[in-house]
Amino acid sequence: MSETADHDRILEASTIEKNHIDELLYMARHLDRMYQQVEYLAVGVELKTDEHPLLVLQGSGVIELRAGGRATQNGSRVMSYRAPNGSPYPDRTHHDTFVSEAGMQKVIESDGTTIITTQRVLYSSPSWNRSWEYAKASEIFHADSAGRGWGASYIGVSNRARTSGFMYRSGFAQSVRDRLVLALAVADGTIEDMVLALKAERSELDRS
């Protein structure tokens, strides 16, 4: 690869990352607008006091890890939802992430509705209902191999022995994971910390 082509590749990657950070910053700064845009899609859902919806996913599913279905993959740039300082903002210096092969995951069903709120994730269908409360969450991680064209987000909670999560079409993965970051920041009261961290990373990208 020529030096010019390599430079162009780095510049393109940096531009994509800047745009992503700008989008996260916009959402963090305009939470009320975010809530209003989603509330009409969550009609009929009984929300708790001060609970707001951030994303509604139609045609989603429930998935569980089989015994021994977790592995560690090194060298991946990942989002760590519980950084050492307590902030839910992604710790981008962390290089260990949980991954699972499709055969190590068990799909419960894939024809329901998932709602990400500022307090929990809710899944409902005519035959299945489940919720994952952030206050009880011990870990959150993702799998990009939940099935052909499917991704998943797992939430380990203290009141459930088996780790489970919700699945969605791969094209929605970035939106789902960004809104989980945002939801955790709201739940933990660290939204301003998230904004500061995003601004610092944006400045660093500009300098580099």
Image (tube, rainbow, N blue to C red):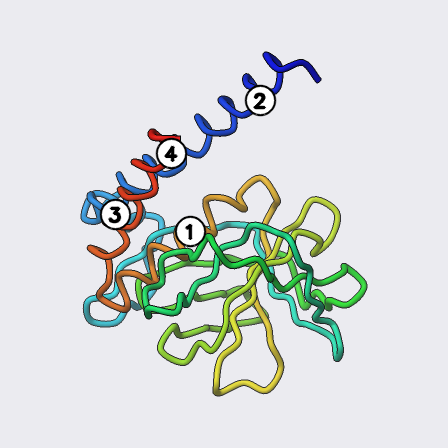
Q: Element at badge 3? A: helix
Image quarter where the N terminus lies is top right
How crowded pointer 1 is (Cα within 10 Å; few <14, some 14-19, many 20+) is rated as: many
Say what secondary structure mark 4 lies in: helix
Question: Which amino acid is tagged 4?
Answer: Leu
Residue 56: mark in rendering: 1
Mark 2 or mark 4: name the one nearer the start of the chain.
2
User: What's the distance in space between the residues labelled 2 and 4, CA to CA?
Assistant: 15 Å
Q: SS for tag 2? A: helix
Q: Nearer the viewer, residue 71 or 5?
A: 5
Q: Quadrant of residue 47?
A: bottom left
Closer mark to the observer between disc 4 and disc 3: 4
Q: Which mark is residue 9?
A: 2
Q: Which residue shows up at 34% across the image and 29% down it?
A: 206
Q: Residues within 10 Å of mark 4 (few under 14, many from 20)?
A: few
Q: Is residue 33 above or below residue 73?
A: above
- Name the residue located 29 percent from the left edge and 50 percent from the top edge: 197
| Residue at disc 1, secondary structure | strand
Alpha carbon separation for disc pair 3 and 2: 29 Å
On screen, 141 above or below 75? Answer: below
Q: Do tag 4 and tag 3 residues touch (Cβ < 8 Å)?
A: no
Q: Pinpoint residue 117: horizontal percent, then vertical percent.
A: 34, 61
Measured in 3D between alpha carbons, the distance from the residue under mark 1 to the one under mark 4, in whole angstroms, is 32 Å
- Give the percent coordinates (x, y) of residue 202: 32, 37
Q: Which mark is residue 28?
A: 3
Q: Mark 3 belongs to which amino acid?
A: Ala
Sequence-first disc among 3 and 2: 2
Residue type pointed to by label 1:
Val
- Please report whichever mark, 4 or 3, sits nearer to the chain's N-terminal start: 3
Identified at 60% across, 76% down, the residue is 163
Q: Where's residue 77, x and y in %? A: 56, 50
